[in-house]
Amino acid sequence: MTDSKVRQQKKNVAKNTRPNKRKKNTPAAGRAAPSPGVVGPLPEDGLPLLWDEAAHKIPLSVRGQPFKVTIPSVWMPNNAATNVRTDIRYFWKGDHVHTAQIFGPYDPAVLFPYTQELPAWLLDSPGISLLYYEISGVLLPTGESERTLIDVDDSPPNLDNPGTELIFNDYTLDGVSDAELTADAGIPCEVPRYMIMRTEDVVMVYFGVLPHINYVDRLVVERRHIEDGDPLQFLIPEDFVRNSGGGERWVSYRLMDRVGNIGPFSDPVKLDINLVSLPDLLRPLVPRAETDGLIDLDDIRQGVSVSIREVVDAEQGDIITLRWNTHVLATITVGPLQIWPIPVEVAWPIFLAGGFDARYPVRVWYQFARGSLTKNSPDTFIEVDATVAGDPPVGPDPINPMLPRVTVKGVTEDNVITPADSPGPVLVEVPLFVDPEVGENLRLFWGNDGAFADIKVVDPGDVAGQNVQLYVPWALIVAGGGLVYVYYWTYNGVNYQRSPATEVRVELDTLTGLLAANVLNDHPNKWITCDTVPQPYEAVIVGIPWSTTHFEVGDKVRLFWSSHRTPNGGGTPIPGTQVWFEVELTDAHRIAGVVEVDIQPFDPLITVPGLIPTNGSGLHYYRLYKASGPTGRSAARPLRIDLIRPSGSTCLAPPAGKRSKPGKSKSQ
């Protein structure tokens, strides 16, 4: 049977009408016995039958809706395999109220259980009613199902009368002491028995300053309460009583059956609750927020703490649990000589959990406990604003590694400033930070926070990642030299954060008097030829003399080299031969009095100029970069190179890998 046909069968509902009385001469009028093999219908939303019930109860929650009735399984015999119609007529209190039709062939395993919606008004009248159905069809004898009893119960327990007062011990009625409350773990009581008790009736107990307001818990009636006469005992929990406090309290209850019918409240019973008083508590202080009620990123970076002020009459062993919203900051046991106030640090993960998207409120408070007794301190309410312009912080450090670095656009190369950049200003570029909002800004600094260079304020239409152009005045640049750290701060009106710094070399060469470098290969004319020692293919070494005036351990020298087709370093450099070698100065250099630099790779730096018949050359000079301060540049010296012997043979390098490589070149 197809799915569409099954759906059609389940949706095929014939006329739903008000009851039609059966004719007196029909078999059903004489209450014919159910046909064998025709199971009775079941209410889809009915409650399961209990041990003391014969009729299915219908919950209040489904009344007023169509009455869903299910036939659990197909009847026998049936027309499942035959292309004929089967009529199903439903009866309520003997009246025909609904008809459904099934068309064969069909698959009983798919079609059943078979559910139909009967009129909602059937459940309007209270009482017990008889429900069954009748089947008929071609070649199918008319048969009636087994009967099902339906109970539409609208009467609350105890016939809708208030229950009598709860039963308490005499000592409870005389007043509940702290010791009694602890010993009994609460206040025990008994619910008086009432008329027509039913399984799964519910007793709802209330306890509070006013009668019938504060719900405590429920007691469910069980079979043992009815059959064995077990008392209906209830315990008002100790914590509930303590949290309610001391003084006059009222206790009452009301009854509800399993259908949902609720009866009236019982008369309340007055109890006097006499509890031991815990010390008075002062609200905790958040020193960094006491003035303005706000914790911002600057506060977080400097360290946020909560101060618990002295609890007068606190005793050794009392426990204080400090909370920041839902987070427990600390659990403190009061010592024999407790020092007050008690400071508690708020760690970074607490702020990380709060997030950086928006300002949020924080409730700071603590619970004071002595034994099983507890008391909450007054609340301190503050706000935390850790929002930033740009990527959220990854830690308390103000430098956020997620922010993009700046690029200083020097004329000769990025992040290098030379006299060619004079008179400025010098362009600096950086992608705009994520999620920019109008009014946020980016402030550029040159070297330190005292050297403000430029500012970018976010305008309407600006988007993350767009190129931001800023400019550095030449006066800032010439004020210092050497290695300069360039960065920016972002600001959103509340919090600052800083980008990682870009290292910028300021090569204005204000240091003078640097000695020129010399070739260290041994040759009478200080050339590079096939007669030099060491051989050219073994090494070409340039030495930078140590300057006691200008050199210090930790400074850096950068030797620049270019190869030329002329013997004196003139003309345009040979393509691919402009390189530099950087060395950090050490004590070994100072003691040796020279900084050796190996010029490599041999090919092409030495071989290309050396194989020119008229001889080529290498031009070299170096620049000094102080660890802090200005730079200097030595004079340039040419180095003639001739790798052709008089016989016409050459002295080229052996295969790669057979010579030492003490240095490493970088293209200019």
Image (cartoon, rainbow, N blue to C red):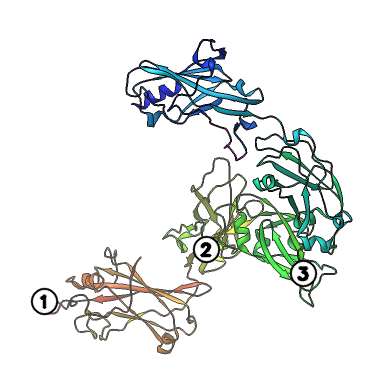
- Indicate which disc, 2 or 1, sits on the residue closer to the N terminus: 2
Quadrant for residue 252, please give it: top right
How packed is label 3: few (under 14 Cα within 10 Å), some, or many (20 or more)? some
Q: Can the viewer see residue 24 in this picture?
A: yes
Q: Which residue is mark 1?
A: 648
- Indicate which disc, 2 or 3, sits on the residue closer to the N terminus: 3
Q: Residue at x 21, y 69 (%)?
A: 608
Q: Main secondary structure of the magenta part?
A: loop
Can you say whether 579 is above or below 145 in the image?
Answer: below
Kind of element beneath mark 1: loop
Q: Which residue is mark 2?
A: 501
Can you say whether 551 is above or below 608 in the image?
Answer: below
Task: Please state which of the two labelled residues, at mark 2 or mark 3, is closer to the viewer.
Answer: 3
How packed is label 2: few (under 14 Cα within 10 Å), some, or many (20 or more)? many
Q: Can the viewer see residue 284 in this picture?
A: no
Q: Which residues are magenta?
A: 42-51
Assess whether mark 3 and mark 2 are in contact (beta carbons under 8 angstroms).
no
Residue 591 in picture, x, y percent from top left = 43, 89
